Image (cartoon, grey):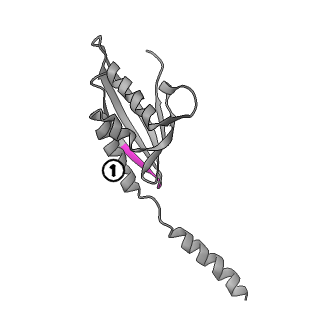
Amino acid sequence: MKIYLLVIPAMLTLLSCNQPKENSGENEKLVKQYFEYFNKHDWHKMAAMYSDTAAFKDPSLGQGVVKQTKAQIIKKYGELSQLFPDVKDEVISVYPSGDKHVIVEFLSTGTAPDSSKFELPICTIFKIENGLISQDFTYFDNFEQ
């Protein structure tokens, strides 16, 4: 009887380790596709990569976590491309982190209507669940120089 008390927890532990996890390689592909859509300014396809209501941390949206729908994402990036028609993100590095997160370091560039240019280093932590981005936590220096 005592042997069963040791074997059953051990078997349960082994079985729990074999549970399917989201593939970090698939998540990395999804994020690369995201930046392709961004650089083509295909806001509808990019927004379709998010869950119905995704959580954002983004200085441009205010303090703390802000929930955004796909329609709000399309509007936000549509307005961004109105201000900077040539806005583009150059991915520097992609860091898969576990089975649900991908961290991306990139350089955002663009030209304003007055011909002034910007270069902004950014880091975003994406959380991916069920093949969709559920969190987009973006960090950059938002203080004017």
Q: Describe residue 114's horizontal placement relative to residue 74 as left or right.
A: left
Residue at 73 percent of width and 86 percent of height = 2
Q: 118 or 51: which is nearer to us? A: 51
**Residue 8 x %, y %:** 64, 80
In the image, is residue 16 above or below residue 86?
below
In the image, is residue 94 above or below residue 66?
below
Question: Which of the 4 image quarters holds residue 13?
Answer: bottom right
Quadrant (top left, top right, bottom left, bottom right) of the N terminus: bottom right
Figure disc tally:
1
Asked if one can make out residue 92 in the rendered structure from this viewpoint, the answer is no
Question: Which of the 4 image quarters holds residue 82?
Answer: top left
Q: Is residue 108 magenta?
A: no
**Residue 111 x %, y %:** 29, 19
Magenta-drawn stretch, dominant element (helix, strand or loop): strand
In the image, is residue 48 above or below residue 61?
below
Q: Describe residue 118's horizontal placement relative to residue 62 as left or right.
A: left
Q: Describe residue 18's horizontal placement relative to residue 41 as left or right.
A: right
Asked if one can make out residue 53 in the rendered structure from this viewpoint, the answer is yes
- Callout 1 environment at 10 Å: few (<14), some (14 to 19), or many (20+)? few
Residue at 47 percent of width and 32 percent of height = 139
Looking at the rendered structure, the kind of residue marked 1 is Lys
**Residue at the extreme right:** 2
Q: Dot 1 lies on which element?
A: helix
Magenta-highlighted residues: 94-99
Quadrant (top left, top right, bottom left, bottom right) of the C terminus: top left
Question: Which of the 4 image quarters holds residue 144?
Answer: top left
**Residue 44 x %, y %:** 34, 37
Which residue position holds label 1? 29
**Residue 91 x %, y %:** 32, 38
